[in-house]
Amino acid sequence: MKILHVLDHSLPVHSGYTFRSQNLFRAQRAMGHEPVIVTSPKHEESWSENWALKEKINDFIYYRSGSVRRFPGLFAYQAWLMHVLSRRILEVAQMEKPAIIHAHSPVLNAIPALWVARKLGLPIVYEIRAFWEDAAVDHGTYAEGSWKYRLTRLIETMVCTKVDHVTILCNGLKEDLVARYIPAEKITPVFNGVDIDDFQPCSADSECLAEWQLEGKKVIGFIGSFYRYEGLDLLIKAFARIAEAHADAVLLLVGGGEMENELMALVAALKLGRKVIMPGRIPHERVPGVYAMIDVLAYPRYSMRLTELVTPLKPLEAMAMSKALLASDVGGHRELIHNGKTGLLFKAGDVDNLTEQLDRLLTEQKLRENLEQQGREWVKENHTWEKTTAVYQEIYRKVRVAF
C-alpha cells in the first residue's frame, strides 16, 4: 500500500525530525508499505546546497516543493507556503496515487494535506511530534498565552477534529489533546524507537578519541542540538564543580545550534579551557563510536510545556548503547526513564542536585554498570522501531475501512 507522507524537512538535513522520519519509512517498508514523501518549502530553507524536484535518498523518493520568498504582513508567508505545498501535494498524489495521505507536524503541513485528501477522496492521518506553539515559545517567537499562541493552538485543535486519525509520539501529547476534547480513540501513540543494530555497544572512535584527547578521561557527554531548553548552560555550571573534585573529568558537547556561542562564552567565563570539548556536529555514521567513549550521558532539560509533554529520542540511543544516563525529571524524561533502573533523574533546573547525581555516577561503578545493562534490556524489549511502529498497520486499516 502506497502512503504519501508530507514532511516539514527531510534528509539530507540532519535533525531528530529527519532521523525519526527515516526510521518510520524503513519500518513501514518492512511492513509491506511503499512510502513516498513530499517536503514543504521549509526544507529548502534548511538545506542550502544542491537539490532537485525529485530525489532518491536511501531508496526512498522525495518530492520537493521549492523555496518561497517571505512576504511582509501578518501570516502572509505562512499562507503562501501552504498554497505552494498544497499544489505540490496534489500534483504528487495525482501521479503516485496513494491509498492514504500521512501529514507530519507542524500544522502548516496538515492543512494543505487535509485539503488535498478531501479533494481526492483519500483518508488522512496527522502525526504530531510537538506542538508548534510550544516550540515557538522556546525560540522566542511569541509568549505562552499570547494571542498568536492561542490562535496556533486553536488551529491545531481544529485540524485534529477534521483528520481521520491523529498519531503522536508520547502519552503527554495524547493527554493534552484529550483535554481539548479530541476523542481518545482517535489518537494513537507511535513512540520513538531505536535501531539496536545501528546503536549497540562498540569500540570508541579512535580518531576522535585521539583528536579530542579523551584517552583515560572520565567523560560526561551530550550529543544533540543546542536548543535553549536542553539546559546545557546548567550542565556546564554543574561540570565546573565536578571538575574541581575529579581532575580527570571532561565534558564533551557534540552538536550545535542556537546556544553554541553562549555556551562557549560560559566555558570561557568559568575558565574551563580544555576541560570542555565542543567539536561541533559529526557525521551520523560516526555517532555510535562517539557514544562509546562517553561514561555518562547527561540530558538536563529545563521544565517548560514542550519538555513536560514531549519525549526525546537521544536517551533511547544512550540506553541502546549500554550507557548510563542522567536526566532532569521533566515529564518527557519520566515517560522514558525509570529512575534508578534505566537511568537517574534529578530535579529540573537544580544545579546542586545535578552536580550531586553526576558525582554519584562518576564514583559508583556498580550503579553505572547496572544502569547500562538494564537500560539496553528495556530498550530492546520496548522501544525498537519494529515494536513502536507496529501500530501503523491497525491505524491504516481503520482509516481505510472508516473512509
Image (tube, helix red, strand yellow):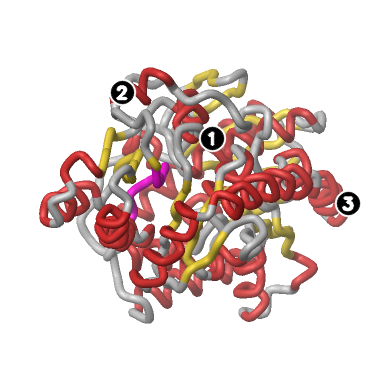
Task: Check contact, mark 1 vs mark 2: CB within 8 A.
Answer: no
Residue annotated with mark 2: 49
- Does the magenta stretch mainly form a helix, a strand or a loop? strand
Mark 1 or mark 3, earlier in chain: 1
Where is residue 32? Give x, y as percent: 81, 29
Residue 156 visible here: yes
- Residue 93 falls left or right of residue 212: right
Q: Which residues are magenta?
A: 219-228
Q: Which residue occupies 58% across, 26% down?
A: 202
Query: Dot 3 corresponds to which residue?
Result: 401
Q: Which mark is residue 396?
A: none
Which amino acid type corresponds to the residue marked 3 in the rendered image?
Answer: Val
Q: Nearer the viewer, residue 341 or 98?
A: 341
Of the image marks 1 and 2, the number of the one nearer the N terminus: 1
Name the front one of labels 2 and 3.
2
Query: Residue at the location (61% across, 18% down)?
Result: 59
Residue 229 picture quarter: bottom left
Q: Position of residue 102 (x, y in %)?
A: 65, 45
Q: Position of residue 173 (x, y in %)?
A: 60, 67
User: Mark 1 Cα within 10 Å, few/some/many (few <14, many 20+)?
Assistant: many
Quarter of the image containing the N terminus? top right
